Amino acid sequence: MPVLCFVSAAVLLQLGAPAAAAASRSNLEIVIGGPPYYEPSPPPEYEPCPPPPPPRGLQPSDFENLRQYKAYLVIQRFKKTITCDPLGVTNTWNGPKICKYRGFTCDTPPNTDDRTIAGVDFNGFTLAAPTICGFADGLPDLAFFHSNTNNFSGTVPDLSRLPFLFEFDISNNRLGGPFPDTVIGLKQVVFLDLRYNGFFGRLPPSVFSLDLDYLFLNNNPFNTPIPKNVGRTSAAFLTLANNGFTGSIPSSIGNAAHTLEEVLFLNNRLSGCLPYEIGLLRRATVFDAGRNSITGPIPLSFGCLKKVEQLNLANNRLFGPVPDSVCQLPRLLNLSLSDNYFTEVGPSCWKLIHRGILNVKDNCIPGLPKQKSPEKCAAFFAKPKRYCPNIHIVPCETHQYGGYYPPTLPPPAPEPTAPPPSKTYSVLHRRLL
């Protein structure tokens, strides 16, 4: 009986095994993927991750003050216009520390306690940009703007809103157009340098009413007469050389007797006589009117230029004797009278010739070497000559002549005293020499 039960149980176990296995497979199918007829949902479409947020731009709070932030914006706009930067100057124009940017100087304007951009000094950087408009006039606290030897083009911006601008130097660039009248409104400027550009046409008389120490206008194509009020200038250094100025040197030049130290008229198209008033320039150390078409004798008043060291009248159409009083000037280092039509020199001039101080080559002086041919001299003197008035006036005492003052000539004024120090920007005390 027990054996039968065991056999029966074994049979039952074998009969039930297939059913159990089927149930397990069914359960497994449900767990893994469900019944055979189930289709899974498609995967979601690919969505790229959003880009990281852009870096935070500089905000006003990143700067010392709001003035610096505004100056930063102006500098960055100008930086984008620069087309050439061979020295890599603009690589330093990053970040909020604008006072450390190369070419910029900071100081505190007199009307605030905020330190800001007070000066631009790009001299020699050879930067190139199509314009400085929006830049030079966009920094309202500028005291000086120096950009000598760059490649800036366009015109000069309106600078009338720069109340502290003291020195403006845009020499050796590619700026052009008529004379920039905007500089006439600069009340603080004492240094104005526009040389080696393309400014042309008429020079406004008002430029000589500016309270300047330095006025450099040389190497531009100005091509009209020098304004008659040139003597109103307060400049000590006046350079009008290498232009196309026409007409005579105005007689008003004598009105600048108390200020002019160096005056350059060379290489223009000037004509007419030398005004005797040039002899009134008692402070002048340099007078240069060479390479023009000036004619007539040298006025005797030139013997009054007691401080002159360099006197150049070469390459003109001057004639007559060289006044010996000119050769007696005590500080004379160089007297160039070559390529004229002078006919005589006195004993003092002979001494300067032997010392190498006086150059009278290519004239009509008998007994001296390297003179014009007799035929050329004769042809010149055969033509009518222009009458030059007042050449015998001597507004001082000389070794050779007693002084003669015409009734209209004012008496000599005392030497000017030094001006008081500037009460504005500390950088206004700087001078570009």
Image: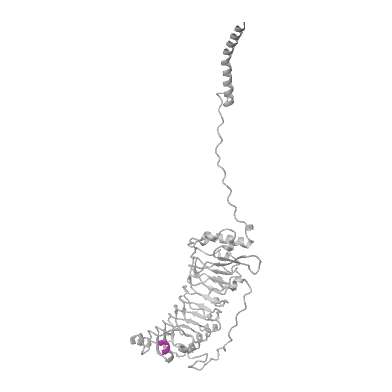
The N terminus appears in which quarter of the rendering?
top right
- How many labels, in total? 0
Q: Is residue 15 left or right of residue 377?
A: right
Task: Give above or below for 333 relative to 121.
Answer: below
**Residue beneath the point at 57% across and 63% down:** 100
Residues drawn in magenta: 350-354
Q: Nearer the viewer, residue 40 or 433?
A: 433
Of all residues, the one furthest to the front in this rendering is 2
Can residue 347 be seen?
Answer: yes
- Measured as percent of width and height from the top left, residue 54 is found at 58, 50
Q: Nearer the viewer, residue 38 or 138?
A: 38
State the image quarter where residue 371 is shown.
bottom left
Coloring applied to the structure: one colour
- Measured as percent of width and height from the top left, residue 340 is found at 40, 84
Q: Nearer the viewer, residue 304 or 181?
A: 304
Can residue 249 be seen?
Answer: no
Task: Give above or below for 425 relative to 9.
Answer: below
- Measured as percent of width and height from the top left, residue 327 is found at 45, 88
- Measured as percent of width and height from the top left, residue 141 is found at 61, 67
Of all residues, the one furthest to the top in this rendering is 1
State the image quarter where residue 67 is shown.
bottom right
Residue 112 in the magenta stretch? The answer is no
Residue 352 in the magenta stretch? The answer is yes
Majority SS type along the magenta span: helix
